Image (spheres, helix red, strand yellow):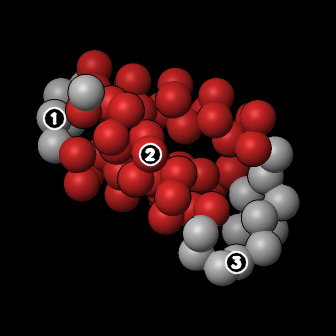
Amino acid sequence: MLLARAFDLAWERYYTAGQEQTLSKEVARRQLAAFLVEMLKSGVREEEPLAACGVLHLISLTPGQ
């Protein structure tokens, strides 16, 4: 499923980038899922753009970023 693959890719990129993460994983999961669903509703139908936007969204939620 497109949504699951994009979620996993964004998650992996954000949490394995080697930078210190201060965003709670519980909060991040909910926020990322909701964001990706909205992106799908708006017409984004490709895995890579969804994942890239998901990473940027997580970064935007990270305190101090």
Q: Give me the disc on residue 45.
A: 1
The residue closer to the viewer here, 26 or 45, is 26
Task: Write down the residue under mark 3.
Answer: 19
Residue 55 locus on image (x, y percent): 49, 56
Which amino acid, by three-letter code, is at mark 1? Arg
Whether the residues at callouts 1 and 3 have beta carbons within 8 Å, the answer is no
Q: Is residue 3 above or below residue 24?
A: above
Q: Residue at x 39, y 24 (%)?
A: 37
Q: Secondary structure at mark 2?
A: helix
Q: Is residue 58 above or below residue 3?
A: below
- Looking at the rendered image, the disc whose residue lies closer to the viewer, 2 or 1, is 2
Marks 2 and 1, the one that precedes in the sequence: 2
Marks 1 and 3, the one that precedes in the sequence: 3
Residue 46 locus on image (x, y percent): 16, 43
- Looking at the rendered image, the disc whose residue lies closer to the viewer, 2 or 3, is 2
Residue 18 locus on image (x, y percent): 66, 79
Q: Secondary structure at mark 1?
A: loop
